[in-house]
């Protein structure tokens, strides 16, 4: 019995049989689609009473399926636009206030420096 020899020798596996026993691969494409059900169509879903379909990479409401009022949609769009404009105005105001704060802080530091210099000069004279 060998000390470091290979005592394990598995049997060789027999060759595989034909990859597919089905004859569906011999059919043409249209027959395969009918037989296997490969024609899925456009994906659709119903969400909160609204029917949506997936077209060109986006979910789109199907025509006539929207249960809400068209005027309500316009009102919401106008309100959204107003809120975006107000948000932009508030951002601008915050930027202006930060600029004013940095300016007054810089002036305050300069005044403190000048005050310290005046104090040291007055101490030297005494």
Image: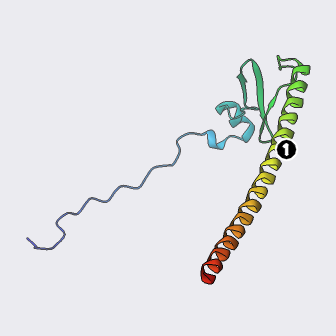
Which quarter of the figure is the C terminus placed in? bottom right
Total numbered circles: 1
Residue 102 in which image quadrant? bottom right
Residue depicted at x 14% and y 74%: 4
Which element is circle 1 on? helix
Residue depicted at x 68% and y 75%: 118
Residue 15 in which image quadrant? bottom left
The percent coordinates of residue 90 (x first, y second) are 81, 43
Residue depicted at x 68% and y 35%: 38
Is 4 drawn above or below residue 108 in the view shown? below
The percent coordinates of residue 100 (x first, y second) are 78, 56
Q: Which residue is mark 1?
A: 89
The percent coordinates of residue 125 (x first, y second) are 63, 83
Q: Residue furthest left?
A: 1
The percent coordinates of residue 11 (x first, y second) are 27, 59
> Which residue is at the front of the view, 58 or 76?
76
How many C-alpha atoms fall within 10 Å of the one at disc 1: few (<14), some, or many (≥20)?
Answer: few
* Residue 15 as seen in the image, left or right of residue 49: left
Residue 30 in which image quadrant? top right
> Which residue is at the front of the view, 8 or 108?
108
Residue depicted at x 43% and y 52%: 16
* Residue 39 as seen in the image, left or right of residue 88: left
Which quarter of the figure is the N terminus placed in? bottom left
Q: Residue furthest bottom?
A: 124
> Which residue is at the front of the view, 114 or 51?
114
> Which residue is at the front of the view, 63 or 66?
66
């Amino acid at each position: 019995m060998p000390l470091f020899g290979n005592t394990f020798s598995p049997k060789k596996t027999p060759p595989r049989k034909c990859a597919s026993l089905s004859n569906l691969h011999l059919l043409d494409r249209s027959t395969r689609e009918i037989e296997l059900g490969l024609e899925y169509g456009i994906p659709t879903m119903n969400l909160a009473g609204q029917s949506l379909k997936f077209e060109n990479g986006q979910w789109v409401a199907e025509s006539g399926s929207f249960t809400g009022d068209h005027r309500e949609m316009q009102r919401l769009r106008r309100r959204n636009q107003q809120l975006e404009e107000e948000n932009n105005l508030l951002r601008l105001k915050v930027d202006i206030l930060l600029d004013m704060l940095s300016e007054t802080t810089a002036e305050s530091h300069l005044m403190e420096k000048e005050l310290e210099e005046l104090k040291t000069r007055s101490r030297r004279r005494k």
